[in-house]
Amino acid sequence: MSFLESLFSGAVSFVRNTLQEGKEFIQEAVHSIVKAFASEKAAKFASKTTGQLIDMFATAKDLVQEEKELYTKAAHDNKQTEADKERLYEIAQERAELKKQMDKASAENSAHDIVEAAEELISTVLTANEAAANIALLATKPCPECNTPMRLTHHSQDTLTKQQKLKWQCTKLNSTCKPIFFKPEAEVVVLRKPTYDLDGNAIVIAGYMHQPAMLKSTHSRLRESLGREDQAITCPTHLIPMRMLEIPSADGSILGSYHYMCTAVADDGRACRYKVPVASMQQVSATLRRSEGRGILD
Ligand SMILES: [Zn+2]
Ligand SMILES: [Zn+2]
């Protein structure tokens, strides 16, 4: 029996493998995902709750806007009224509640994605590249300390291999929970749709991706996404979709010139500091698949 490790938006799932493989294993895994996340009856589950999530994003944006106004007012008046303090506290409460609803809706959407793609899914070993494609996406892995969903984030880059080191980070608001460092695991497999960007020898794939003409066209395709909201990547604090922007003073290369930014303000009145760098070709590939429906080599 398969056992769910994490589920991501875009029909991707990490599943504990008990030495089974093939179509039957995939079907069984999909079945267990439906059981875990379909809170309603099958008929209702069939209709994706995208609308619900869009309403929640609208609420999150309203809270961000109201908070921004209160901070601006406080900075202007050089003090904060009791009523404003009280309202900021309420906003934090409303946001915590909203986060719970959002986590649930996005898990249901992800389960829906995987059911819809069930016929196409393949299973493959969970490598660092596979994980990098799902950086910063809403996931369903529960934090062992507080049970809030975690997400994969960058930790650092290995100076020798240039490989990104990843970690699972708790998304609870103001979380102090310990991250879990990601190790590619032999006993965990990935279920996803096939893509030339991941299927096959990683070195050969990297070679194709880095051919100058390919790199140039990929780069210009990526730039089409500049400034656009990406609903798959949200700020864990402010719950709004982030936008990919150019890093000021970047060197213009495809990796190292862009990051996802949150447009909210932090409690010190400055811009939110949560950023997601675009640091691997697999992340670029995933961004392109979300915006255009095809990756780099597809
Ligand atoms: Zn936690
Ligand atoms: Zn933010």
Image (cartoon, rainbow, N blue to C red):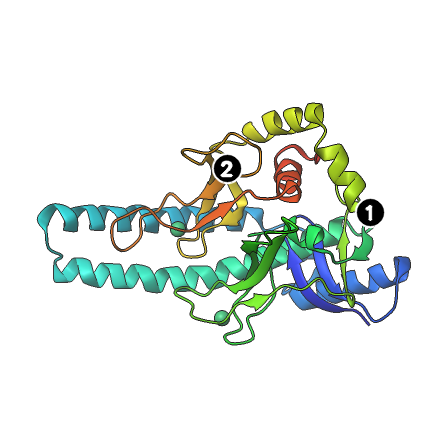
Badge 2 residue CB within 8 Å of ligand 2: no
Q: Earlier in the sequence, mark 2 or mark 1?
A: 1
* Nearer mark to the viewer, of 2 and 1: 2
Q: Are marks 2 and 1 in contact (CB under 8 Å)?
A: no
Q: Residue at x 51, y 76 (%)?
A: 145
Q: Residue furthest bottom?
A: 145
Q: Amino acid at mark 2?
A: Tyr
Rendered image: mark on residue 154: none
Observer able to see residue 156:
yes
Front residue (pair 18, 2): 18
Q: Quadrant of the C terminus?
A: top right
Residue 207 position, x and y percent, is: 76, 36
In the rendered image, which quarter is residue 143 located in? bottom right
Observer able to see residue 44:
no
Front residue (pair 139, 253): 253
In the rendered image, which quarter is residue 204 located in? top right
Query: Where is 228 relative to 34, above or below?
Result: above
Q: Amino acid at mark 1?
A: Glu
Q: Residues within 10 Å of mark 1 (few under 14, many from 20)?
A: few
Q: Residue at x 33, y 51 (%)?
A: 63
Rendered image: mark on residue 258: 2
Q: Residue at x 68, y 66 (%)?
A: 5
Q: Which residue is mark 1?
A: 120
In the rendered image, which quarter is residue 206 located in? top right
Q: Residue at x 44, y 36 (%)?
A: 247
Give the structural element (helix, strand or loop) at label 2: strand
Residue 34 position, x and y percent, is: 72, 63
